[in-house]
Amino acid sequence: DGGITQSPKYLFRKEGQNVTLSCEQNLNHDAMYWYRQDPGQGLRLIYYSQIVNDFQKGDIAEGYSVSREKKESFPLTVTSAQTNPTAFYLCASSKGTRIYTFGSGTRLTVV
Amino acid sequence: DQQVKQNSPSLSVQEGRISILNCDYTNSMFDYFLWYKKYPAEGPTFLISISSIKDKNEDGRFTVFLNKSAKHLSLHIVPSQPGDSAVYFCAASSEPGAGSYQLTFGKGTKLSVIP
């Protein structure tokens, strides 16, 4: 079955560490997105990518970095520059439409 | 500056009755609107959408109404079932100048359907 896989489901980060969240899709979708959700907040766009080797900043890109070396993969790195990284992170993809398919999310906690 | 607003953080409805979730937007360039349903610790799933050229779209128990002049849309669920209990996100997008579509999400409304 096609879908988006995010891993790990739970991730703990020590202060000052970089961590990378994985997002893989086998839907043959061209566009991929990373969103962040905080309690009582909507989904806010971090980065998005339309094609391989190209990506753009979203509304809250500071403290994050991404790469898109393969169509199927769009990993997100949360750097030490992100001062409040504890949140639920969602990856999504789409193919020429506005209907996104979302992964099941990664909950990141700073310890 | 919130472009998509869901002013009711929560809503409780009796099983079998109608649930009405509301959403307002400020950006007149938005021309496509979607509703997503989200359970805890899971990703959102697409529920229903509507283009700005329509004022109503129906899919089974779910109907979305769009009032462009008021910049308002609503999701009706009839009849409501306990399995509908979830957070519902309203999202909007505009035609991209170039590249992929981006969705702007509201903060969500938590629906509780009481048996």
Image: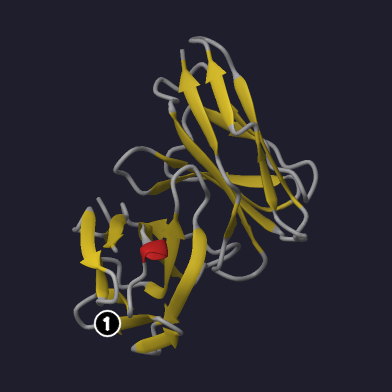
Residue type at numbered disc 1 = Lys
What residue is pinned by disc 1? Answer: B68
Q: What residue is shown at x 29% (from left), y 43% (from top)?
A: A40
Specify whether residue B99 is in view.
yes
In this view, the residue farthest toward the front is: B115
**Residue A66: horizontal and vertical position, in percent?**
64, 35
Specify whether residue A79 is in view.
no
Of residues B87 and B1, the one nearer the viewer is B87
**Residue A24: horizontal and vertical position, in percent?**
73, 45
Q: What residue is shown at x 69% (from left), y 42% (from top)?
A: A74
Counting labels gives 1
Locate the C terminus of chain B and report the quarter of the image it occupies: bottom left
Of residues B18 and B74, the one nearer the viewer is B18
Of residues A13 and B97, the one nearer the viewer is A13
**Residue B8: horizontal and vertical position, in percent?**
19, 58
SS class of the residue under badge 1? loop
Query: Dot 1 falls on which chain?
Result: B
Q: What residue is shown at x 58% (from left), y 46% (from top)?
A: A104
